[in-house]
Amino acid sequence: MQKSMPLDFLLEGFINDELIDKCKNIKINGLVRDNRKVRKGNLFIAHQGFNTHGLLYAEDAVAKGAAVVLWDGGIDEGDETRRDQILANISKQVLCLHCDGLKQKVGQIASRFYEQPSLSLDMIGVTGTDGKTSIAHFLAQCLDAYDVHCGVLGTLGNGFINDLHPTGLTTVDAIQIQKTLAEIHQAGARHAVMEVSSHGLDQGRVSGVAFTTAIFSNLASDHMDYHKTIDNYVQAKRKLFYTPGLKAAVINLDDAFGRELAKECRQHVCVWGYSMQKDAKSLAPFADYLVHTTRIEAYETGFKLGVQTPKGAGNFEIPVLGRFNVSNVLAVLATLLVTQSNFDDAVKSLRNIHPVDGRVELIAAENKPVVVVDYAHTEQGLAAVCSSVREHFSGQMWCLFGCGGNRDRSKRPLMAKVAEKYADKIIVTTDNPRHEDPQKIIDEIMAGFVNTENVEPVISRREAIEIAIHNAQPGDVVLIAGKGHETSQIVGDVQIAFDDRRVAGEVLAARDSGVIA
């Protein structure tokens, strides 16, 4: 049976009382912002999008059966006349309601429509430049181990840990978030963990989500194409920690901004800090509770850890690569302890975590170089995975990476400097060029190298992988960075099938066989 909700209930407090009176006795059976998806009886929500204003499509939405049009101002100069014409036409057919600041209110309206699902869940939000996906998935794996069923929303998809539905976005739109949370709750979940991007926070996509715990991983320059300044980026991240009703913040105290954020958050919420420092006394002023390592010992397939927490101390092993994953595991451990897990149960579940798709994912074969595929696409992310690979493997390191087109250009030479610092051999190739010339992107990366003697630019990503794997020796490690779990390459507006893991596996299998994959 199709859900329907009273329009005055959905909009109470968001529009003035005079308009609310017009909403009485009207029921809405769906919320939609894409005119192509409108069905009869829907509420069509029209506000300024990235490229255009939704009101310009309102006539089509009404023709398809929209019962009500909710709109705000902010329409680009020059389109006012068109707006007035559209409103004059559709207001003769359906109720048109003006709502100031609509974009930031959609999530709350959607939350009401889907009966406020986040209030029925232990809602955990994860933000930061790097590590969001790993933290979210490790946490979901651990909570599922307690048989409490944990939903996941993030880069790899939405749903449950073994049944994710890809969306193409880290944080989907506000309406879809509420719909997904409702579905997760109806499926029996008690917890949900969501990766919360800076875009999602800035655009109000998580407005209406009742987070109980917020996790901060780290901060590096990213998405400057969108935020323009690092201060804007920081302010977007900060918003998660001012969610009304937030009970706890779990914050990385090894990060400079993390320490600043923790000190600030202690004024209004309980702060659990985590750190890889063995002597963490200096961090006491930043957190109410502290989780930190007392021992970190790398071996070929993981780490041996010693940890100290307010709920216990002990030693255990984790089967994941990368020192940054030690930090991610500490974030998870702290969050498990926040959710009232005891120390022994938390450690037991962490012993059994498994790597996240495309995050320091190991592809190995006997008497051949080891391949590591990772999503690192910022200079900080690349530095973290490069230094971690160095810690686990003693042979030469090949680093293959590129940079996405139509994205932050400032990080291109910075990533070159990182690769030059850590790798013995470097191949610069394409990532997702989108609408930029791949050669131009490579040239901007190449400008960051001091010495290009061990650097080879190769436009074809497949050819780059072949060169690295066929020339690396047994005992060497080939790091393929930038795309991780992605299964396509974006060229222009076209997505071409391409999976680093699959291609690397094929090339590795063909190595020494005389066959070119």
Image (cartoon, rainbow, N blue to C red):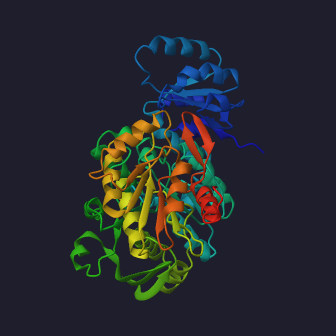
Left or right position of 346 against 253: right
Note whether residue 211 is visible: no
- Number of labels in the image equals 0
Please state, as top left, top right, bottom left or bottom right, where the C terminus lies in the image. Answer: bottom right
Q: In the figure, residue 385 lies in which quadrant?
A: bottom left
In the rendered image, the vertical position of residue 353 relative to residue 76, given as above or below: below
Which of these two is toward me, 147 or 398? 398
| Residue appearing at x 71%, y 43% in the figure | 3
Which of these two is toward me, 381 or 423? 423
Left or right position of 162 against 397: right
* x and y, in percent, of residue 338 in the image: 44, 73
Note whether residue 340 is visible: yes
Please state, as top left, top right, bottom left or bottom right, where the N terminus lies in the image. Answer: top right
- Work out which residue is located at the far front of the displayed protein and give it: 514
* x and y, in percent, of residue 408 in the image: 37, 42
* x and y, in percent, of residue 493 in the image: 57, 33
* x and y, in percent, of residue 322 in the image: 43, 70
- Work out which residue is located at the far bottom of the displayed protein and give it: 314
Which of these two is toward me, 433 or 287? 433
| Residue appearing at x 66%, y 54% in the figure | 183
Which of these two is toward me, 390 or 354? 390
Left or right position of 7 against 327: right
Q: In the figure, residue 297 lies in which quadrant?
A: bottom left
Q: In the figure, residue 242 lies in which quadrant?
A: bottom left
